[in-house]
Image (spheres, helix red, strand yellow):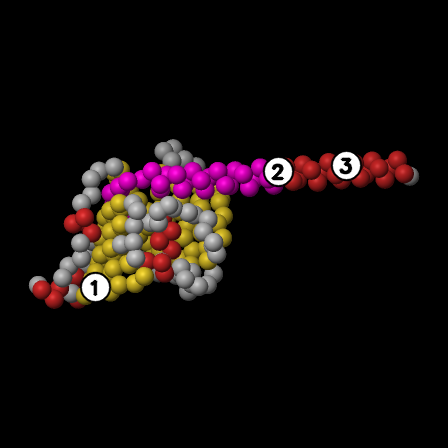
Amino acid sequence: MTSMIRHIKCKWHLAAFIFLVLISESFAVRADVVQRVEDWFANLTTMRADFTQIASDGSASEGQIIMRRPSRLKITYHGEPALNLITTSAWLHVDQPDERRVNSYPISETPLSLILTDPISLRPDGFETTVASRVGGITQIVINKDSGEGAGRLTLEFTDRPFQLRRWIVEDVMGIKTSLTLQNMVFGMPVKNAEFSLPNYLNQ
């Protein structure tokens, strides 16, 4: 009986050891993926792209995006009504040309602030970061915060070959999702400050 118990304990310890090794390897792989994405953003200077955006209600919009890291992002929506989203290191400006109005919000209150900071961190304090693989060589990183400043969920999707940003999905605390898929991306081209200038409607 004693020999049998020892045999069972030995098998249990071996199984537990294998499980711990697999878990540690899984965490290491996930950490490597997050680091690879952080490095991709850190090495990004500028990007221009077309995009298609799908809202929670199924409506679609198209437009163009300009990014100059760190901090500068401009999203221009085509069609009616006209709309521009322009960021600085501190603010998200919402430009509504048809109404000749600009509203400004702290950039820290939006999940997109995570990819505009310098240095970039996709594992900030107070957020939960998870990694998942999808069919077709797509890697998905989900950064989630349930409450407080910057609450919401940001999902980043990267293609494997080439390894680059393909889509992001923003979900606010009310559960409203907006996905933005990039096309025709061009990297490293000069982007002047004037690209991010705000209109002065009072003097027009």
Residue at which label 1 appears: 102
- Give the label, 1 or 3, closer to the camera: 1
For badge 1, the amino acid type reads Val
Residue at which label 2 appears: 22
Examine the structure image and report whether residue 23 is included in the region drawn in magenta: yes
The quadrant holding residue 197 is: bottom left
* Rendered location of residue 90, percent (x, y): 30, 57
Q: Residue at point 45% right, 51% down?
A: 124
How many angstroms separate mark 2 from mark 1 (CA)? Answer: 52 Å
How many angstroms separate mark 1 from mark 3 (CA)? Answer: 67 Å
Does residue 57 lie above or below 42 as drawn? below
Q: Residue at point 63% right, 37% down?
A: 21
Q: On the rendered structure, is 103 left or right of 38? A: left
User: Observer-nearest residue: 90 or 163?
Assistant: 90
How many residues crowd around disc 1 within 10 Å: few (fewer than 14), some, or many (20 or more)?
some
The mark that comes first in sequence, 1 or 3, is 3
Examine the structure image and report whether residue 42 is included in the region drawn in magenta: yes
Q: How many marks?
A: 3
Q: Which residues are magenta?
A: 22-51
CB-based contact (under 8 Å), mark 2 and mark 1: no
* Rendered location of residue 155, percent (x, y): 41, 50
User: Which type of secondary structure does the marked residue at label 2 adopt?
Assistant: helix
Residue 58 visible in this rendered orientation of the protein: no
The quadrant holding residue 38 is: top left
CB-based contact (under 8 Å), mark 3 and mark 2: no
For badge 3, the amino acid type reads Lys
Q: Residue at point 41% right, 41% down?
A: 37
Residue at which label 3 appears: 11
State the quadrant of the C terminus.
bottom left
CB-based contact (under 8 Å), mark 1 and mark 3: no
The rendered magenta stretch, by its main secondary structure, is classed as: helix
